[in-house]
Image: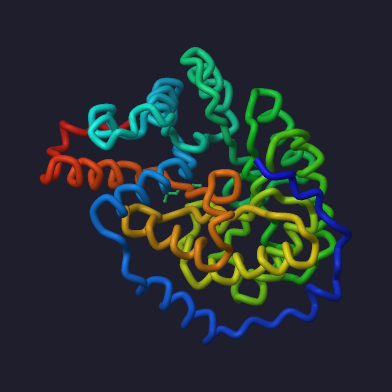
């Protein structure tokens, strides 16, 4: 893991001067999407890289200890052993980066992973996920409880109301308090970009979140009507780059919500490589928040190894 982002004092001058060129952002996003992707073994290698960056997620009202247990087992062995063996990758320790669950399920995930002797991180959403519309005291307590239960990563949601009304100082203070409540746990800050209205607001919220000490900035909860899109990602990764150039602190990026296909994952990796460079292409600085993406990646790997697509019973997924 690179050194954590300690944050900096709120720089309101930087925030107030931001203007985003919408046409340029849309053009850049189109260029990235249009890039030709590698085939065969190159594609398979990129897909395995994507697997190692997944926060394998379940965030459903009907989550139980047993489906969280299955999720953990899948995170530990994300691709069928014989397929990895065929690619000579079976002894490379390929797992997903983390599992991501609701706070009430953290203890279940920690227990399952510990029993299996796994060091995969448990991440938990918190702070009134997904809307963030509960009292600050409650949101802070939720972070502390998830950490106490063993979460090593906390995905907080921002108070969109503060961002939409331009209360950047109040937003900075809230995020700063969440960071303190996280203690040693890494903090990913979810901007819920689909509810921020403009690219300019997305850029402003990104830099405020980083100034307040976020280790990652994350696009979405997966519950908004618009989640991770490439144009919005261009705005966020440019903010990460600007923050790095000004402060020397590296902040990670996590697109999440609606990322379902292998092709999507390849475009996300391309975006990171082209915008932030190879250094950001690792689980310490890049995550894909996804509940169903892994199924498609495993299917594509199966096809690469066997030359045919698997029947549903051949690749059971958690
Ligand atoms: O943070 C992760 C997202 O909630 C997952 O969204 P998804 O179910 O659309 O993959």
Q: Quadrant of residue 34?
A: bottom left
Colour scheme shown: rainbow
Q: Position of residue 91 (x, y in %)?
A: 38, 27
In the image, 114 versus 182, the foreground residue is 114
112 versus 217 height, above or below: above
Quadrant containing the C terminus is top left
- Judged left or right of residue 12, residue 214 is left
* Place of residue 208 in the rendered image (x, y in percent of width and height, measured from the top left): 76, 62
Answer with the quarter of the image where residue 283 lies: top right
In the image, residue 276 sits, relative to residue 283, either above or below, namely below
Q: Is residue 155 above or below residue 275?
A: above
Image point (68%, 40%), residue name: 186
Residue at screen point 78% across, 73% down: 15
Q: Is residue 57 left or right of residue 308?
A: right
Tell me the quarter of the image containing the N terminus: top right
Q: Nearer the viewer, residue 291 or 314?
A: 314
User: Residue, x 51% and y 61% (percent of image)?
Assistant: 272
**Residue occupying image coordinates x 62% and y 53%:** 252
Q: Point out residue 220 in the picture as x, y percentages from the top left corner.
A: 54, 56
State the residue lying farthest toward the right.
9
Q: Nearer the viewer, residue 117 or 61?
A: 117
Residue 181 point in image, percent of width and height? 78, 37
Specify the farthest residue to the front: 88
């Amino acid at each position: 893991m690179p050194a954590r982002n300690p944050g900096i004092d709120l720089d309101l001058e930087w925030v107030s001067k931001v203007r985003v060129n919408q046409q340029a952002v849309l053009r850049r996003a189109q260029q990235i999407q249009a890039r030709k992707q590698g085939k065969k073994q190159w594609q398979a290698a990129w897909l395995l890289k994507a697997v190692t960056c997944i926060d394998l997620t379940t965030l459903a009202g009907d989550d139980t200890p047993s489906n969280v247990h299955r999720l953990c087992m899948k995170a530990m062995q994300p691709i069928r052993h014989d397929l990895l063996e065929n690619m000579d990758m079976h002894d490379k320790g390929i797992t997903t980066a983390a599992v991501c669950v609701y706070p009430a399920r953290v203890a279940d995930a920690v227990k399952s992973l510990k029993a299996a002797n796994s060091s995969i991180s448990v991440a938990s959403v918190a702070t009134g996920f997904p809307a963030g519309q509960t009292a600050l005291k409650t949101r802070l307590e939720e972070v502390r409880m998830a950490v106490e239960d063993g979460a090593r990563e906390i995905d907080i949601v921002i108070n969109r109301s503060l961002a939409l009304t331009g209360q950047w100082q109040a937003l900075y203070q809230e995020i700063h308090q969440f960071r303190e409540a996280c203690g040693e746990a890494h903090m990913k800050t979810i901007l819920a970009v689909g509810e921020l209205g403009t690219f300019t607001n997305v850029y402003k919220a990104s830099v405020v979140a980083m100034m307040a000490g976020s280790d990652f900035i994350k696009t979405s909860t997966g519950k908004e009507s618009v989640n991770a899109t490439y144009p919005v990602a261009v705005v966020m990764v440019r903010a990460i780059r600007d923050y790095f150039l000004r402060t020397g602190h590296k902040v990670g990026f996590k697109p999440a919500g609606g990322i379902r296909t292998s092709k999507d994952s390849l475009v996300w990796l391309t975006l990171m490589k082209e915008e932030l460079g190879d250094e950001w292409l690792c689980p310490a600085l890049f995550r894909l928040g996804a509940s169903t993406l892994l199924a498609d990646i495993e299917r594509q790997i199966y096809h690469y190894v066997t030359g045919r697509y698997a029947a549903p019973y051949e690749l059971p997924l958690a």
